[in-house]
Image: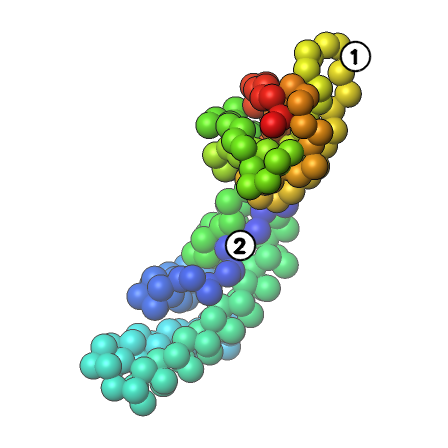
Amino acid sequence: MKKKLALNFTETSDSDLSVVGARVAQCMTENEHFSDPGMLIIKLKEITKQYSHALADARSGDRVKVSIKNDTRELLIKKLKQVADLVQSEAQNSEYILISSGFPTAKQQGPRVLKEPVDFSILPGPNPGDIIMKMRRVIGARSYLYQWTPAPLTPESIWESIADTRCKKVISGLPLGVNYCFRMAAVGSRTQIVYTRVLSRYIS
């Protein structure tokens, strides 16, 4: 899998961004893995220094100084991304060379394995023939299946299904006087499906 730099600085704190700028400027200076970046790193050093001063001034809470800090922050992020373009172009997917630039690298995440659903329950709905099906949210689930079939449950039973992104739903219009089996399933990436236990209830 291709290695990438972590370049989403939206949630990076002001102080952490200052650290990133200084670290990249230091690591890219005379870095043997990259052709001479020349003015690019010189400009990065200048903007990082300006941002550090603006950050210190903004601690007073003065609106003008805070505005200057915010503008300088945007300039620093722009310059960091320009340096990152050079780094990713010349590193040729080498994780070691990417790290040598001083940039943080993006974590590679595989598909999340869904855990077994818990707290599945069925309750009477607001109207006759309504059933409320719910369970605790499953981390990593993209959607949920709500299924029901007349009891008793056999290998030939056919489940009726409704999909939803929520983990609680009212099933309406079930015939009165029929005993039904119910279950839910969490659906994840790569066709992962994890079912709850089966519960039954008489519809009245």
In front of the other: 96 or 21: 21
In front of the other: 2 or 119: 119
Whole-percent x, y for residue 113 in the image? 56, 29
- Marks 1 and 2, how far apart at CA: 53 Å
Residue for badge 1 = 156
The amino acid sitting under disc 1 is Glu
Badge 2: residue crowd in 10 Å (few <14, some 14–19, many ≥20): many
Q: Quadrant of the N terminus?
A: top right
| Above or below 26: residue 173 | above
Check residue 5 in the rendering and tell me which mark sits there, or answer none: 2
Element type where label 2 sits in the image:
loop
Whole-percent x, y for residue 98 in the image? 52, 51
The amino acid sitting under disc 2 is Leu
Element type where label 1 sits in the image:
loop
- Residue extending farthest to the bottom is 64
- The answer to which of marks 1 and 2 sits earlier in the sequence is 2
Which of label 1 and label 2 is nearer to you? Answer: 1
In front of the other: 8 or 117: 117
| Above or below 43: residue 157 | above
Q: Residue at x 46, y 27 (%)?
A: 119
Whole-percent x, y for residue 53 in the image? 28, 79
In the rendered structure, are the residues bearing label 1 and label 2 in contact, judged by CB atoms less than 8 Å apart? no
Q: Residue at x 45, y 53 (%)?
A: 104
Whole-percent x, y for residue 193 in the image? 64, 28
- Residue extending farthest to the left is 60
Q: Is residue 189 visible?
A: no
Q: Residue at x 76, y 16 (%)?
A: 157
Q: Residue at x 46, y 76 (%)?
A: 74
Q: Quadrant of residue 55?
A: bottom left
